[in-house]
Amino acid sequence: MLQTALHFSHTLLKEIIQVGDVVVDATMGNGNDTAFLAELVGSTGLVYAFDIQEQALINTEKKITELGLNNQTILLQQGHETVGKTIPEETELTAAIFNLGYLPKSDKQIITKPDTTKKALDALVARLKRKGRIILVVYYGHAGGEAELALVQKYSQQLAQEEYSVLTYQFINQKNNPPILFCIEKK
């Protein structure tokens, strides 16, 4: 059976993340990816998790506390566009994940935006180590979603093929704008 974009994103991350790695959850949301990443990097690794919404921080903190993953996570109530200022320049990242759109079961007016996503991508690509991956799961069935999808497509297509491989994964026969997954891998 084919995996959903979300499950496939986790498969792609499990393939490369090792205990002790440094990774980023660019959109912590309800903390599912943050917890998943924290388990993969173990107690010697580090997850930087970003979100502008206080509720996302509360939900994520509760989840990682219940799972005993606090020591390897840094939760930041700030936008992912601040990655470049927050994570030291010399830090090599193994992976990053984005779920672009809005926080489920919250204010659907608060959405990720193309300009902030581009700033985050620029900073992450610069810190990505060899064979590292940036996963973007793009939910685009809302106002503003098509513009962000266009930005991610254009950004990904313009990466030099000598340095990066880019994969897209989507279901093309489903209704209601199923998410599209992009995976940027540094060669």
Image (spheres, rainbow, N blue to C red):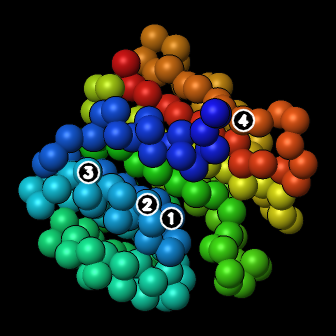
Q: Residues within 10 Å of mark 3 (few under 14, many from 20)?
A: many
- What label does residue 27 carry, if any? 1
Q: Where is residue 98 shown, x and y percent of the image?
A: 53, 54
Q: Nearer the viewer, mark 3 or mark 1?
A: 3
Per the image, the residue denoted by label 3 is: 40
Q: Where is residue 126 shown, x and y percent of the image?
A: 36, 39
Precedes in sequence: disc 1 or disc 4: 1
Q: Are marks 3 and 4 in contact (CB under 8 Å)?
A: no
Quote the CA–CA distance across marks 1 and 2: 9 Å
Precedes in sequence: disc 3 or disc 4: 3
Quote the CA–CA distance across marks 1 and 4: 20 Å
Q: Is residue 148 left or right of residue 44?
A: right
Q: Are marks 3 and 1 in contact (CB under 8 Å)?
A: no
Quote the CA–CA distance across marks 3 and 1: 18 Å
Precedes in sequence: disc 2 or disc 4: 2
Q: Nearer the viewer, mark 1 or mark 2?
A: 2
Quote the CA–CA distance across marks 3 and 2: 11 Å
Precedes in sequence: disc 1 or disc 2: 1
Report the front residue among 126 and 178: 178
Per the image, the residue denoted by label 4 is: 170
Q: Where is residue 32 shown, x and y percent of the image?
A: 45, 66
Q: Residue at x 43, y 28 (%)?
A: 185
Q: Where is residue 116 shown, x and y percent of the image?
A: 58, 60
Quarter containing the N terminus: top right
Per the image, the residue denoted by label 2 is: 33
Judge whether 75 appears above or below 161 on screen: below
Precedes in sequence: disc 3 or disc 1: 1
| Badge count | 4
Dot 4 lies on which element?
loop
Judge whether 172 appears above or below 41 on screen: above
Residue 90 makes an appearance in the image: no
> At label 1, which amino acid type do we have?
Thr
